[in-house]
Image: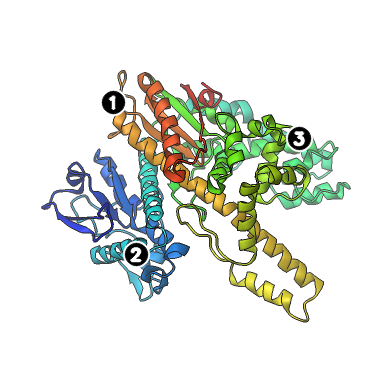
Amino acid sequence: MHVVVAASSPGPATAVDVGGVTAAEAARGERPRWTWADTNLWYPGLLRAGVRVDRCHDLRLAHRVLRTSAWTAGSPLAQGPSSSWDTLQPVPAGGTQPPPDDDGTLFDLDPAPRASGAGGETTLDGPACRTELHAQLDAVATSQAPGRLRLLLAAEAAGALAAAEMHRAGVPWDADRHDEVLRDQLGSRPPLGARPERMERLATQVRDALDAPTLNPDSLPDVLRALRRTGLAVTSTRSWELQQVDHPAIEPLLAYKKLSRLFSANGWAWLDAWVQDGRFRPEYVVGGVVTGRWGSSGGGALQVPKQLRDAVRSDPGWVFVVADAAQLEPRVLTGLAHDDRMAEAGRGTDLYQGMVDTGVVDSRAHAKVGMLGAMYGGTTGASAAVLPRLARAFPQALALVEDAARTGERGDVVTTLLGRTSPRPGASWHETQVLAQSDDADAGAESKARAQTRAWGRFTRNFVVQGTAAEWALCWIAEVRRRLWALGVGDGPPGLAPAPFTGRPHLVYFLHDELVVHTPAALADAVAAEVREAAAASGRLLFGDYPVDFPVSVGVAGSYGEAKDGG
């Protein structure tokens, strides 16, 4: 069997003859950087064999970055015609795609998905993967910032490995406790297709209050029409708007909406489908959002409702270490802008409280809403009132996001710290702009163009911050993953995690700026320390010696709910 390994330094890939041994046997040897089309095609099979891969190069993830990065725009990879790599769809961690057999060669991708190329269906076989790898190495080497791009590609690949591992290990989940919560909140389990009894009672109250005996409370258009028939000037059924309305239907309607979310997103059907053998196995899509954030292909991987946190319970003799990076995006903005006063406000303390303590704003709430407005383009209400004070106090930070917004409004692209580049607006955006500038454009066309311009500016304003925060989080994941493995096997019960994680602390959950580690209780303090040190190391990796802090709040407990509350 031949394993193609990307050299750790720039240069051609090396073909390593491992003499017909299985992929699992090869992985147990030296530390190769495994290079494959998609981590989730290959890594699950190795994990089932009890093998942990230390590092890899994911061609699909790397291609997407390099094809669109402004830093590689002049490369043959970026300028070439569309190929199978542009249309290859991700296989989510834990997806249904059957893995290749271990005794095949690494690049014999049958029965992998076929991707439609310019000439029809094309299998991404060994030669195609080698050709793509060489093109990627060349694109990086000739880019504007090779070092940063290499770090991004390595972090993306490490994230893909971690996602597959989290699916393999699963989140420990107490199905009986989950059922208790549902019964407490909703009543007894209803027959298939029926509403739980408490939801049905609330639905009846809403119908009576609105004099609408056939109203379906799950139909938002029907509910909105019924509210307006009673004379209520509502524009939507959003909870924040309904809370401002005084009418007998509002209280039961809000209660119904809350229970409906629980029932539909995490009710008994979800429990039956997603919790097996005491584990919930999320299906992550690494880089599933355009900014580089992760997405989910099912199961609600990116949310655990507060009501159900207590159902997430560790194995006997084990605990959760829940780590939350405090104010991640504004701290990333601080590092991007090198805003010294903002860095000082967050040094060793809550950043928002630091803004209050230094006299920038009068309350933590105002600091938070002001920074969110700066990063997301808030121009009304409390955010608009606070922004001028923030701009005077932190001119470099505010100037960076304003510049990103102006760039987007011109239809240009912005790039994250490590090289992920925003997409350009589509053809309809440009058509609207051209129409608004024509001699016969009316006020409506001009207004539409301005609205689209501002909206795209808000997108690019946030892209640089959210995208760089996603890069920091990937580096954090990679560093935590490495440090956890180095801790080895803990004392006490081995736990229920499958090989290769039996007895070892391991990642089980990730949400943007939060990591959850399942660990033997005896290693909990060591894990907490490593998670904190990994956050600091990730900050140094991205921002060098610039003094921006990345503090992490850590909770340790036997349930996710207790750990989230501080342990």
Residue 78, compared with residue 533, is above or below; it is below
- In the image, 514: left or right of 425? left
Disc nearer the start of the sequence (2/1) = 2
Q: Position of residue 299 (x, y in %)?
A: 49, 43
Q: In the rendered structure, are the residues bearing label 1 and label 3 in contact, judged by CB atoms less than 8 Å apart?
A: no
Q: Amino acid at mark 1?
A: Val
User: Residue at label 3?
Assistant: 252
User: Residue at label 1?
Assistant: 489
Which residue is found at the position 72% from the left and 37% from the top?
A: 366
In the displayed orientation, state which residue is furthest to the bottom: 439
Q: CA distance from mark 3 to mark 2?
A: 51 Å
Which residue is found at the position 63% from the left and 72% from the top?
A: 430
Q: Position of residue 50 (x, y in %)?
A: 25, 38
Q: Amino acid at mark 3?
A: Pro
Q: Nearer the viewer, mark 3 or mark 2?
A: 2
Q: Can I make out residue 157 in this image?
A: yes
Q: CA distance from mark 2 to mark 1?
A: 40 Å
Q: Nearer the viewer, residue 61 or 191?
A: 61
Say what secondary structure mark 3 lies in: helix
User: Residue at label 2?
Assistant: 114
Q: CA distance from mark 1 to mark 3?
A: 52 Å
Q: Amino acid at mark 2?
A: Arg
Q: Can I make out residue 280 in this image?
A: no
Disc nearer the start of the sequence (1/3) = 3
Residue 174, compared with residue 293, is above or below; it is above
Say what secondary structure mark 1 lies in: loop
Say what secondary structure mark 2 lies in: loop
Q: Nearer the viewer, mark 2 or mark 1?
A: 1
